[in-house]
């Protein structure tokens, strides 16, 4: 059974680590563990599945973008004196960068679905806002202004994890509540009426036809 308290600690610290390049991978693993805890606590497997898809798409985008940078840097020295080849190299780099951005947008869309469900289940609306900033930032990545939105989304992500409650809203505590005793109706008593049949000995004297006080005449 997942714990929101554990998810709050791991997710908050992991989100802080994700702000820095050196500790990004450690922060990513901690956030992954936190989202898994939330999925188990809310019994919504979709939360973790969407986040896994988001992670895979973003990892793929990172590899594509890293390879594009490496390839451009490796070939730049050979074509630096040839403007046509430089233009061709930049065109190839732009194509791979576009592919990386598309993969990133798809990944952030899955992350938004995961965070939207978390916001709905836990009542922490900051998850929805953080995911929205991430999505806008990934779309505007090619214009460079997207980095600002991603940074704001990352800061909001830290706030969202630390705002997680220890229990789900409306969760029932483990102590059983005693059932209320039904109220008695007005005028009712606890005395049960006996339905014992009347015997012949208990029949009234009028039933025999004899009048008390009279004696039979001879």
Image (cartoon, rainbow, N blue to C red):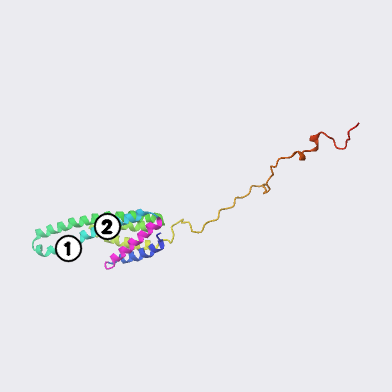
Q: What residue is shown at x 38% (from left), y 57% (from top)?
A: 40
Q: Is residue 125 visible?
A: no
Q: Label 2, secondary structure: give it.
A: helix
Which quadrant holds residue 139?
A: bottom left
Q: Quadrant of the C terminus?
A: top right
Where in the figure is residue 32, as x and y percent of width and height? Answer: 33, 61
- Residue most extreme to the bottom: 22
Q: Which residue is mark 1?
A: 70
Q: Which residue is mark 2?
A: 56
Q: Main secondary structure of the magenta part?
A: helix
Q: Examine the structure image and report whether residue 26 is included in the region drawn in magenta.
A: yes
* Left or right: 198 in relation to 116: right
Q: What residue is shown at x 24% (from left), y 55% (from top)?
A: 103
* Left or right: 71 in relation to 49: left
Which residue is at the front of the view, 40 or 217? 217
- Give the residues in magenta: 21-42
Q: What residue is shown at x 36% (from left), y 61% (from top)?
A: 34
Q: Is residue 92 visible?
A: yes
Q: Examine the structure image and report whether residue 54 is included in the region drawn in magenta.
A: no
Where in the figure is residue 17, as x and y percent of width and height? Answer: 31, 66
Where in the figure is residue 36, as x and y percent of width and height? Answer: 35, 59
Disc 1 to disc 2, C-alpha distance: 21 Å
């Amino acid at each position: 059974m997942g714990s929101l308290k554990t998810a709050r600690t791991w997710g908050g610290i992991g989100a802080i680590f994700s702000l820095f390049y050196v500790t990004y991978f450690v922060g990513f693993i901690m956030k992954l563990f936190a989202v898994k805890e939330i999925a188990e606590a809310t019994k919504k497997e979709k939360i973790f599945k969407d986040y896994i898809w988001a992670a895979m798409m973003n990892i793929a985008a990172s590899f594509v973008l890293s390879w594009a940078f490496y390839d451009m840097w490796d070939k730049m020295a050979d074509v630096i004196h040839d403007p046509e080849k430089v233009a061709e190299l930049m065109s190839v780099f732009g194509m791979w960068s576009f592919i990386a951005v598309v993969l990133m947008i798809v990944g952030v869309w899955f992350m938004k679905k995961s965070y939207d469900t978390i916001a709905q289940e836990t009542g922490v609306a900051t998850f929805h806002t953080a995911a929205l900033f991430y999505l806008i930032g990934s779309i505007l990545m090619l214009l460079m202004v997207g980095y600002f939105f991603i940074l704001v989304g990352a800061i909001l992500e830290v706030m969202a994890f630390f705002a997680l409650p220890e229990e789900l809203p409306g969760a029932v505590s483990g102590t059983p509540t005693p059932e209320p005793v039904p109220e008695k109706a007005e005028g009712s008593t606890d005395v049960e009426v006996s339905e014992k049949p009347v015997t012949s000995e208990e029949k009234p004297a009028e039933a025999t036809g004899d009048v008390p006080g009279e004696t039979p005449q001879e």
